Amino acid sequence: GWSKAEATNFWIIALFVYSAIASLLPVWLLLQPRDYINSHQLLVALGLLVAGLVVAGVRGEADLAAAAPAVVPAAEVPADAPPLLPFLFITIACGACSGFHCLVSSGTTSKQIACETDARAVGYGGMLLEAALAVVVILACCAGVGMGVADADGKTVTGRAAWRTKYQAEITTVAAEGATPATVGGWKAHGLSQKLTAFVDGGANFVSALGVRPRLATTIIAVLVACFAATTLDTATRLQRYVVQELAQTLRVDALRGKYAATGVAVVTGGAVALLPGAGGVPGTGGLLLWPLFGAINQLLAGLALMVLVFYLVRRNLPAWFAILPMALMLVLPGWAMAHQVLFDFLPAGKGLLVAFGLLILALQGWMVIEAILIWPKARGVLEEALPDLPSNPAGAGGRSC
């Protein structure tokens, strides 16, 4: 007898309670076995997508050039679409260069590998798979959707007409519960739910090319999306707890240095945002209020991680030239995109929350860049304070270098 809003809020609270418990438990007790099972689900789904793409391409069922040509007439480009430069560099986000993965690798991955020498295979290999998935997602949202979707009359349309039909059909559903959906046009009306739907439908078309029933194929891709969300939720809560504890230690706030208090801060603040009404006044969609900032923030974080890497190398008198150019690109382009969003999107639309967060992130980035410039002349050869060595493992089952 619950309404949709009540059911949504219940599951938000339940998931955050789970995240709190999972982030407090030892990694080997829940996170490792759950991620181990989850990794197999993701690999199977990715394998099906790639195999379906190959089969659909060989049969001529998937045609990227027809569904989404690389060059289109200017009249067909939405008037409110963002410029290709710099937004191309933050659209792919995790599939290109992910700042969030830097946090994960330092906060959890580095503490689980058996040997330091495994870090390259695990970290670099993981990002290669992430990049492969990003390419498959783009193909699914273009050629996959172009394989065919149902229009309002139940008829199947293909090619570029399929993408337009799906786009228009989806954006008419953006409305609060109980309200009359209103058709809205343009690029900015195409939100997260529409993007996820396009990927699920396009990916399901690829899997269906292998002979899988369409409804089952849709379920497989939907589970793939849910698996990514599941692996992120409690890991992000654990990382947020680390951040709160480190800030508390730096600022000498003893009350928040414990893992229970820090986890409480992470869960309560994140849950409060999630429970807010988002676009259209729909309850439980508050996270979507900040979603437009995700790509730029993720890439800026990658730039700052590269900055840390550059200083690590310079301090040890090691070559750092190969990391300086990527660092500069990952600082300038996402910062440019963030400034563009704030000035030309958020501010004219009166989105004060996004304007405030955008300016705050830009200010923090500027602060860190200025600090780096000031430290640079005296950084070479000066090592940071070393941490004590980890205890060796007499059984030889792992250690610093194996």
Image: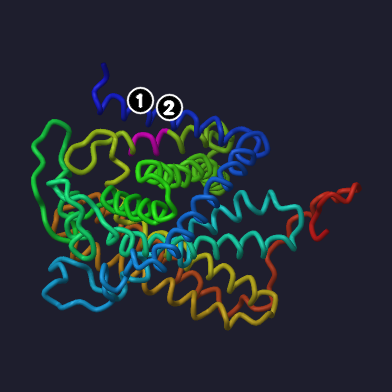
Identify the residue at the far top of this view: 1
Tell me, yes or no, if residue 42 can be seen here.
yes
Q: Any magenta on residue 272?
A: yes
At horizontal 47% and vertical 28% (from top left) the residue drawn is: 17
Q: For mark 2, what is the residue?
A: 14
* Amino acid marked by disc 1: Phe
The image quadrant of residue 188 is bottom left
Measured as percent of width and height from the top left, residue 241 is found at 53, 41
Q: Which residues are magenta?
A: 268-273
Identify the residue at the far right of this view: 394
Measured as percent of width and height from the top left, residue 104 is found at 56, 52
SS of the residue under disc 1: helix
Q: What is the chief secondary structure element of the magenta stretch? A: helix
Q: For mark 1, what is the residue?
A: 10
Mark 1 → mark 2, Cα distance in angstroms: 6 Å
Q: Any magenta on residue 64?
A: no
For the residues labelled 1 and 2, say whether their Cβ atoms are less than 8 Å apart.
yes
Above or below, comparing residue 218 to residue 386 in the picture: above
The image quadrant of residue 365 is bottom left
Above or below, comparing residue 283 to residue 365 in the picture: above
At horizontal 24% and vertical 79% (from top left) the residue drawn is: 71
Measured as percent of width and height from the top left, residue 359 is found at 30, 60
* Amino acid marked by disc 2: Ala
What colour scheme does the image use? rainbow
Q: Quadrant of the C terminus?
A: bottom right
